[in-house]
Image (cartoon, grey):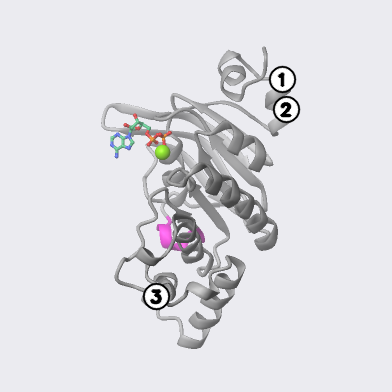
């Protein structure tokens, strides 16, 4: 678990400014959802938090420590991407243990972590299969498993359900909510889907053109949207 503070974050790619003066607080154990239309900067903001992109200006603090210069691997963060990019030639077990094997954890420790994550995600039966022998939902769970075995303090999810069909999206969404309770961990979750945001979040951050429009609990945004953009996007009748 962990808390994260972003202070006056700007990010530009060359002359293209993508994030403008982003400020926010993510509390220990909170489920925070970044929501906003395609291209508004959600993935960039996640990548900045993960350390995969350097900020142009501003400060990122994790547990009250400035981490701007801290390498991604040292931030205690695991990211689950939209395209889950499993290794096709490796079994589920090998896919899930790959990162730990690189880090030279001992075999017994790796085995214990993989089996525990597999149990949490109901993947135990599939540990010897290859990705091609799994459904889309099972593959996405393997990608989540790969993150879990690292025991991260923070999980970042970037539109994890967008490659799944509608029924599976609902089911996986419920599983992610359960996972948050079970792991008792901080989650930042990106989506462009308002329903996902409303059902999953303790706190929603509405982004628009690289700026934070409003931060609040789902019902707060619904009942008292700060402006027309938020009202239109979250779907309240104002
Ligand atoms: P979202 O995830 O909300 O759809 P992104 O964070 O992916 O949005 O992108 C925000 C904006 O930043 C887009 O206009 C995108 O084209 C631009 N962008 C993202 N990554 C790069 C990059 N590496 N180089 C240049 N522009 C980028
Ligand atoms: Mg994105």
The question of residue 26 being in magenta is answered with: no
Look at the numbered discs 3 and 1 and tell me whether their residues touch, using CB distance below 8 Å: no
- Ligand 1 found in image quarter: top left
Write down the quadrant of residue 120 in the picture: bottom right
Give the answer, above or below, for where 6 lies relative to 238.
below
Image quadrant occupied by the N terminus: bottom right
Between residue 34 and residue 174, name the one nearer to us: 174
Q: Earlier in the sequence, mark 3 or mark 1?
A: 3
Mark 2 or 3: in front is: 3
Residue designated by label 2: 220
Q: Which mark is residue 94?
A: 3
Q: Decide if residue 205 is in sight here.
A: yes
- Whole-Å distance between the Cαs marked 2 and 3? 44 Å
Q: Which label is found at residue 22?
A: none
Q: Position of residue 170 (x, y in %)?
A: 59, 45
98 or 26, which is in the foreground? 98
Q: Residue at x 54, y 63 (%)?
A: 152
| Left or right placement of residue 190 versus residue 91 in this view | right
Q: Position of residue 61 (x, y in %)?
A: 54, 48
Q: Secondary structure at mark 3?
A: helix
Q: Residues within 10 Å of mark 3 (few under 14, many from 20)?
A: some
> In the image, residue 69 lies at what x, y percent?
41, 53
Q: Nearer the viewer, residue 29 or 20?
A: 29
Mark 2 vs ligand 1: CB below 8 Å: no
Q: What's the magenta region?
A: 70-77
Residue at mark 1: 224
Q: Secondary structure at mark 2?
A: helix
Q: Are marks 1 and 2 in contact (CB under 8 Å)?
A: yes
Does residue 74 show up magenta in the picture? yes
Does residue 71 sit above or below 214 in this rendering? below
């Amino acid at each position: 678990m962990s808390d994260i503070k972003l202070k006056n974050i700007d990010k530009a790619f060359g002359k293209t400014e993508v994030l403008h003066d982003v400020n926010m607080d993510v509390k220990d154990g909170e489920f925070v959802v970044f929501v906003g239309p395609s291209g508004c900067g959600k993935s960039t903001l996640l990548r900045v938090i993960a350390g995969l992109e350097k900020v142009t200006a501003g400060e990122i603090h994790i547990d009250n420590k400035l981490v701007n210069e801290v390498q991604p691997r040292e931030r205690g963060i695991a990211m689950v991407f939209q395209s889950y990019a499993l290794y096709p030639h490796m079994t589920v077990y090998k896919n899930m243990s790959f990162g730990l094997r690189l880090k030279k954890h001992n075999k017994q420790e790796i085995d214990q972590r993989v089996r525990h994550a597999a149990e949490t995600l109901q993947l135990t039966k599939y540990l010897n299969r290859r990705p091609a022998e799994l459904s889309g939902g099972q593959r996405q769970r393997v990608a989540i498993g790969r993150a879990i075995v690292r025991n991260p303090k923070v999980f970042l999810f970037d539109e994890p359900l967008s490659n799944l069909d509608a029924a599976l999206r609902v089911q996986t969404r419920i599983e992610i909510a359960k996972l948050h309770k079970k792991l008792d961990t901080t989650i930042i979750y990106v989506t462009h889907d308002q329903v996902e945001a409303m059902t999953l979040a303790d706190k929603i951050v509405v982004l628009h053109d690289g700026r934070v429009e409003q931060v609040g609990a789902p019902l707060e945004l619904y009942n008292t949207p700060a402006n027309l953009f938020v009202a239109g996007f979250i779907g309240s009748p104002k």
